[in-house]
Amino acid sequence: MSDRRIQLRIVTPDKTVVDMPVEAVGAMGSEGAFTALPGHLPFLTDLQPGLLWYRTEGHNRDLAVSGGFIEILPDKAVVLADSADYLDEIDVERAERALKRAQERLAAAKAEADDAEAGLKTDISRATASINRATTRIKLATRRIGR
């Protein structure tokens, strides 16, 4: 690998989204925004829901991530993300429908909170994760298209 590139690998539970050498990668971690270049000091951080970008051949590519972790090493970056979607591939209307369904599930789960135990906690966690994922997709995609 060239000393001007780092190997970027972005993996979700469903697929490998990216596995290629890049010039830089950046995102929002728990301690704030960061940009990693080749030779960067090693670190590990969680990813905040939002934008993850990388530069290859002088052009930036933007992805919406809904959380996860990133490990930076001098010659590579590994992202384990809950979800990762290229902004130009996000279907905003579909994300808005998913947001509405998740909000309805969350409201129903909270209404039943007095009657259930562990199963309800799972429903609330899934609904909350869906809301975060859909909200991130909508926010980033609509900003990209100026809507």
Image: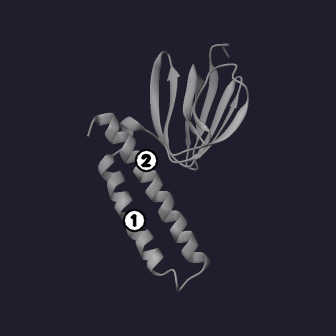
Residue 118 position within the rendered picture, expressed as x and y whole percent measured from the top left: 61, 76
Q: How many marks?
A: 2
Determine crowd level at label 2: few under 14, some 14-19, many 20+ residues with C-alpha closer than 10 A.
Answer: many
Q: Amino acid at mark 2?
A: Thr
From this view, report whether residue 33 is shown above or below residue 100: above
Q: Residue furthest left?
A: 147
Real-space CA distance between mark 1 and mark 2, rounded to the nearest whole angstrom:
14 Å
Determine crowd level at label 1: few under 14, some 14-19, many 20+ residues with C-alpha closer than 10 A.
Answer: some
Q: Which residue is mark 2?
A: 136
Image check: 64 left or right of 20?
Answer: left
Residue 40 position within the rendered picture, expressed as x and y whole percent measured from the top left: 69, 23
Q: Residue at x 62, y 21 (%)?
A: 37
Q: Earlier in the sequence, mark 1 or mark 2?
A: 1
Q: Amino acid at mark 1?
A: Gln
Q: Secondary structure at mark 2?
A: helix
Q: Secondary structure at mark 1?
A: helix
The colour scheme used to paint the residues is: one colour
Q: Residue furthest bottom?
A: 115
Residue 33 position within the rendered picture, expressed as x and y whole percent measured from the top left: 56, 33
Residue 138 disc label: none
Occupied quadrant, residue 106: bottom left
Residue 9 position within the rendered picture, expressed as x and y whole percent measured from the top left: 61, 33
Assign the N terminus to one quadrant of the image: top right
Q: Residue at x 41, y 52 (%)?
A: 134
Assign the C terminus to one quadrant of the image: top left
Q: Residue at x 45, y 32 (%)?
A: 62
Q: Which residue is mark 1?
A: 103
Image check: 26 left or right of 97?
Answer: right
